[in-house]
Image (cartoon, rainbow, N blue to C red):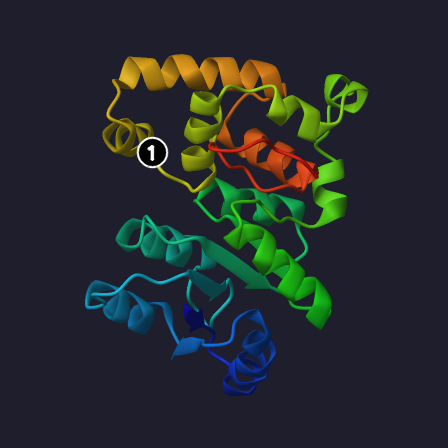
Amino acid sequence: MHILLVDDHTLFREGMRFLLQGLAEIIMITESDSSESALEFLNGQPDPLDFILLDLNMGTTNGIESLEQVRSVAPEVPIIVLSAEQDAIVIRQCIDAGAMGFISKTSSHAELLAAIQLILAGGIYLPRDVTLGHSSDRQSLKPESDILAGLSNRQREVLRYLLQGKPNKTISNEMNISLNTIKTHLSAIFRELGARNRTEAVYFAARAGVPLDSSSDISP
């Protein structure tokens, strides 16, 4: 397993390096102390990464802009934001920018590992109090996992790509189907989830708390 850890505090990176060892028997962690050095590494990285842990606030760097830049050069890699920030608006901005998870720096070791494992399995992790604040009356009538299970395999595949922050054109190319077909699938998915856009779909998936796998049934 190969992880890119981007944070401008040396002590925090050292602590995270220790905590992340519990994820796999063999793990390689590349450290970066700025978004600039992270981008330089990603542009020259020949081998795929398993995921990126990105600190949202590094010095004078605009966190959302850094996230967008990293997303643009590593569109296939799950990005997990680490932050002491608790603002629901900021969390939503991170999801809008393509993050697959948002983990508070105040989380326990167990919470951190559980969140990362969920994301690696194809799920979404967001603070529970944030996701609960975005549930609708319709969603409360039926468990989110049951609604996801009701999607077709094709719809779950489209949704999985969408949750990874990939634009419609990329999804179209990877699935080898037209943009219009992608849009049709998305309209049906949003209707089933009671979501109006990608961000609301991400919040829905986070509440469901289960991996999204287009090739198998979804169960808690």
Q: Which residue is at the front of the view, 91 or 139?
A: 139
Q: Is mark 1 on a helix, strand or loop?
A: loop
User: With respect to residue 118, does 218 lie above or below?
Assistant: above
Hey, what amino acid is under mark 1? Pro
Q: Position of residue 106 (x, y in %)?
A: 71, 68
For the point 46% across and 59% down, which residue is it? 63
Is residue 38 visible in the rendered structure shown here?
A: yes
For the point 74% across and 46% down, which residue is it? 128
Q: Left of 39 or right of it: where is 56?
A: right
Q: Where is the N terminus found, in terms of image quarters? A: bottom left
User: With respect to residue 12, does 127 lie above or below?
Assistant: above
Q: Where is the C terminus found, in terms of image quarters? A: top right
For the point 41% across and 41% down, which residue is it? 165
Mark 1 crowd level (few <14, some 14–19, many ≥20, 10 Å Cα) = few
Residue located farthest toward the front when viewing the structure as drawn: 216
Q: Which residue is at the front of the view, 42 or 83?
A: 42
For the point 43% across and 62% down, which residue is it? 52
Give the residue pinned by disc 1: 167
Q: Which residue is at the front of the view, 27 or 173?
A: 27
Q: Position of residue 151 (x, y in %)?
A: 55, 20
Q: Left of 160 or right of it: where is 48?
A: left
Could you say which quadrant of the image residue 4 lies in?
Answer: bottom left
Q: Left of 4 or right of it: where is 180?
A: left
Q: Position of residue 209 (x, y in %)?
A: 67, 42
Could you say which quadrant of the image residue 193 lies in?
Answer: top right
Could you say which quadrant of the image residue 177 lies in?
Answer: top left
Q: Left of 153 or right of it: where is 200?
A: right
User: With respect to residue 188, does 193 lie above or below?
Assistant: below
Q: Position of residue 35 (x, y in %)?
A: 36, 67
User: With respect to residue 213, does 117 lie above or below?
Assistant: below
